[in-house]
Amino acid sequence: MSCIVQLATILSPIIAVLLAWWTVRSSAKDTAKKIAALEDSTAQQIAALNESTSKQIAALEENTKKQVESVKELTRIQIKTAILQANTDMKKLTAQHKQLTQRVYEESQQSVFGNQYGEPFNTMRQEKNRQRDMMDEQDLALNQLKELHSLTAQLNELYKEVGGK
């Protein structure tokens, strides 16, 4: 029995050291597995965040493109409206100019007939003044018409610049 006690006394520190070594080694393997799992989880989370961020950026870019296209379309519509308004004004002024031209012609014809039949001098002066007033109105209408043509040309150029056809 003393031999067993002596053997147990000698082996017990060796067994304790081996047991400690085995515990440390098992613990190190478990820790390494846990660290690897944590790294994988972190990598997956980062990948998910990157994907989510990429999707958000893509959505923002798409939204921005839609907004830009909406602004362009609004600009096109506003320019078309301005062109239509200018065309309407030109039609009115063209009609007014035509009417004034006709009146000037009629007044000059009446003046010729009036001179042939010896109308008094004051009547001729009144007719000339009236004729001059109509010519002034005619010139004004013609100038406004020229300005509207210029404006329409500029609006058409602007419309083409913003992508109109």
Image (cartoon, rainbow, N blue to C red):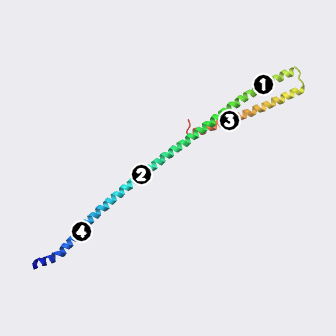
Seen in the picture, residue 71 relative to 37 is either above or below; the reply is above
Mark 3 vs mark 4, foreground winner is 4
Seen in the picture, residue 132 relative to 17 is either above or below; the reply is above
Q: CA distance from mark 3 to mark 4?
A: 96 Å
Q: Look at 80% across and 22% down and name the residue there.
A: 109
Disc 2 marks which residue? Answer: 52
Q: Are marks 2 and 3 in contact (CB under 8 Å)?
A: no
Expressed as whole percent of the image width and height from the top left, the position of residue 133 reads: 80, 31
Q: Is residue 71 visible?
A: yes
Which amino acid, by three-letter code, is at mark 4? Thr
Residue farthest to the top? Answer: 117
How many numbered discs?
4
Disc 4 marks which residue? Answer: 23
Secondary structure under tag 2 reads: helix
Mark 4 vs mark 1, foreground winner is 4
Expressed as whole percent of the image width and height from the top left, the position of residue 118 reads: 89, 21
Residue 149, quarter of the rendered image: top right
Is 4 placed left or right of 25 in the picture?
Answer: left
Mark 3 or mark 4: which comes first in sequence?
4
Which amino acid, by three-letter code, is at mark 3? Leu
Disc 3 marks which residue? Answer: 148
Q: CA distance from mark 1 to mark 3?
A: 25 Å
Is 15 placed left or right of 66 in the picture?
Answer: left
Mark 4 or mark 1: which comes first in sequence?
4
Is 36 placed left or right of 97 in the picture?
Answer: left
Secondary structure under tag 4 reads: helix
Secondary structure under tag 3 reads: helix
